[in-house]
Amino acid sequence: MEGHTEGHTYERAKRTGNVMLALLILLTVVEFSMAVLLDGAVLLAGLALGAVVEAFLIAEYFMHLRQLRPHVATVWNAATRGLRD
Amino acid sequence: MTTASVQAESTHAAPDRGHRLTMNRLGLWLFLVSDMSFFAAVISSRYFISGVQTPEEVNQVLGLALASVLVISSFTAYRAEMAAAHGDHAGLRRYLVSTIALGLVFMAGVGFEWHEAYLHFPPSTGFGTVLFTITGIHATHVLSGIVILALVIKSATPGRYGPGNYWPVEGAVKYWHLVDVAWVFIYPTLYLVR
């Protein structure tokens, strides 16, 4: 199985990394700023959303989560076979 | 061995390699998901034990610095993987060394945090229990990640890893990204909520 990295150029991969680094640093600073300016439930919701977005960006662009998508159905069917039989 | 049998063997080997890589990736993701579940349980305990209040003595600058260091280390780890994927041996070593260096900086920061935290909220307090448990478990993961990356550097002889053949680098880097994802949730949990 070829991962999605192999078809991309090295330069494109580097650019992706640079953009992701900038986004992640920005999100971290935004979280810190929210903590300074907000509190209570609004802060909690904002921090939760920020963390989820950061985690997704890392999983999708750094960990290549999309490599798994063709196999999700296979894993799901294998995991639920006992329930269906 | 005849030319025909060698060709037949290599043709048969290619799908096997692809299948093995798929299984490697699926297996690693299963492990990563289970480890994240463990972190989720430990992180959620913070809210049960000490609510959403964060003591004033928590070092916010240190927390922001630690978060930044790990984010940058995730970038260098990604660059190491891309270097391996595109046959850039020098880049692979450079970025793996950078990732390890940043990991060691992070560990030093956590050590300093523990020194400060022990004075204000020792493990006998609610927040202290939470802080030392969560950061201790995370630091153990960082340390094991550093060891794994060092082993990958040791194995990265020139020409060893290249396009289509860099699974050890990919696996080690994915584990390192798990460490960063965990801190993405730990950082606001311990430092920012109030």
Image: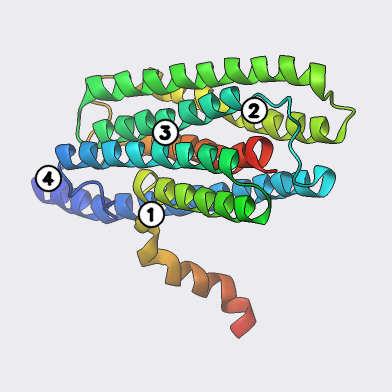
Along the polypeptide, which appears first: circle 3 or circle 4? 4
In the drawing, what numbered circle is on residue B140? 2
In the image, which is nearer the foreground, mark 3 or mark 1?
3
Q: Amino acid at mark 4?
A: Thr
Left or right: B134 as drawn, with respect to B50: left
Q: Position of residue B143 (x, y in %)?
A: 58, 24
Instruction: Give SS at disc 4.
Output: loop
Instruction: Give SS at disc 2.
Output: helix
Instruction: Give SS at disc 1.
Output: helix
Q: Position of residue A27 (x, y in %)?
A: 44, 42
Query: Circle 3 marks a residue in which chain?
Result: B
Q: Amino acid at mark 3?
A: Ser
In the image, which is nearer the foreground, mark 3 or mark 2?
3
Q: Are marks 3 and 4 on the same chain?
A: yes
Please name the residue that numbered disc 4 is placed on. B2
Please name the residue that numbered disc 3 is placed on. B74
Q: Position of residue B101 (x, y in %)?
A: 45, 16
Query: Circle 2 marks a residue in which chain?
Result: B
Q: Residue drawn 46% across and 47% down?
A: A54
Q: CA distance from mark 3 to mark 4?
A: 47 Å
Q: Are marks 2 and 1 on the same chain?
A: yes
Q: Disc 3, disc 1: CB below 8 Å?
A: no
Please name the residue that numbered disc 1 is placed on. B22
In the image, which is nearer the foreground, mark 2 or mark 1?
2
